[in-house]
């Protein structure tokens, strides 16, 4: 069985996203906690959501071009992967976000070990969806690695701030999984639980 196919990557991407979304909803159901434990708990859904988007991008790349260099599959940089997708498919991902009311109902949060603790990130204002997508992919390009190795950054007293825009990030992920599904002739409809 070939695991390096667009349909297999679609299935993985969808499953990782749906599970990370449910976990996020559960973590945030009672608001934001000043508790340092939130900092560690949130790393799991941040990793799995980042990995989900990475898999969707790689599935799209495989669909577009069967001869992708092996080194591309070692890349975790989301902005770099997105830039390798054809402009036509990039536009579909952008347009999907513009024409659908995705609204994932997750917060944009700053995970912080400073005195003021974890808090909702300030509202971001973008002139359009293209700008928002590029900005989020740029600021979250290494989220998979950063959150995956969070435990290696030192003691719990070390000051670390991470801004993870769960809301915007999940909108991009939903759009990317949906477009990959459409390319494969599959129907994917995300329903916020």
Image (cartoon, rainbow, N blue to C red):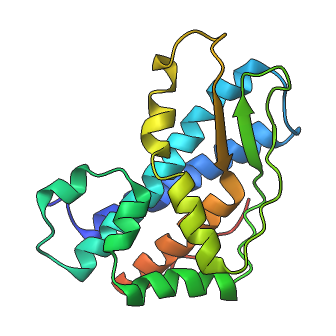
Quadrant of residue 111 within the rendered picture = top right
User: At 68% across and 27% down in the image, what residue appears?
Assistant: 39
Q: Is residue 181 above or below residue 185?
A: above
Q: In this view, does 31 lie above or below 55?
A: above
Regarding residue 138, the answer to whether it shows in the image is: yes
Quadrant of residue 28 within the rendered picture = top right
Q: Is residue 9 above or below residue 76?
A: below
Q: Where is residue 37 in the image (x, y as percent from the top left)?
A: 71, 20
Classify residue 72 as left or right of residue 15.
Answer: left
Classify residue 161 as left or right of residue 155.
Answer: right
Q: Position of residue 26 (x, y in %)?
A: 75, 41
Q: Where is residue 91 in the image (x, y as percent from the top left)?
A: 49, 87
Regarding residue 185, the answer to whether it shows in the image is: no
User: At 24% across and 72% down in the image, what residue appears?
Assistant: 62
Q: In this view, does 115 lie above or below 46?
A: above
User: At 51% across and 35% down in the image, what residue appears?
Assistant: 147
């Amino acid at each position: 069985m070939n695991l390096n196919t667009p349909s297999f990557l679609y299935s993985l991407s969808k499953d990782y996203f749906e599970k990370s979304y449910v976990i996020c909803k559960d973590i945030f159901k009672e608001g934001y906690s000043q508790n340092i434990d939130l900092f560690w708990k949130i790393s799991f859904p941040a990793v799995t959501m980042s990995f989900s988007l990475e898999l969707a991008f790689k599935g799209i790349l495989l669909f577009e071009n069967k001869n992708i260099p092996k080194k591309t599959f070692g890349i975790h940089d989301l902005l770099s992967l997105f830039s390798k997708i054809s402009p036509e498919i990039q536009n579909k991902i952008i347009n999907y976000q513009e024409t659908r009311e995705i609204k994932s109902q997750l917060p944009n949060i700053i995970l912080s070990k400073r005195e003021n603790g974890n808090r909702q990130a300030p509202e971001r204002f973008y002139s359009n969806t293209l700008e928002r997508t590029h900005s989020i992919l740029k600021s979250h390009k290494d989220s998979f690695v950063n959150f995956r190795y969070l435990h290696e950054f030192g003691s719990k007293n070390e000051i670390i701030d991470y801004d993870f825009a769960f809301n915007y990030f999940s909108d991009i992920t939903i759009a990317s999984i949906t477009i990959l599904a459409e390319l494969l002739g599959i129907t994917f409809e995300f329903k916020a639980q």
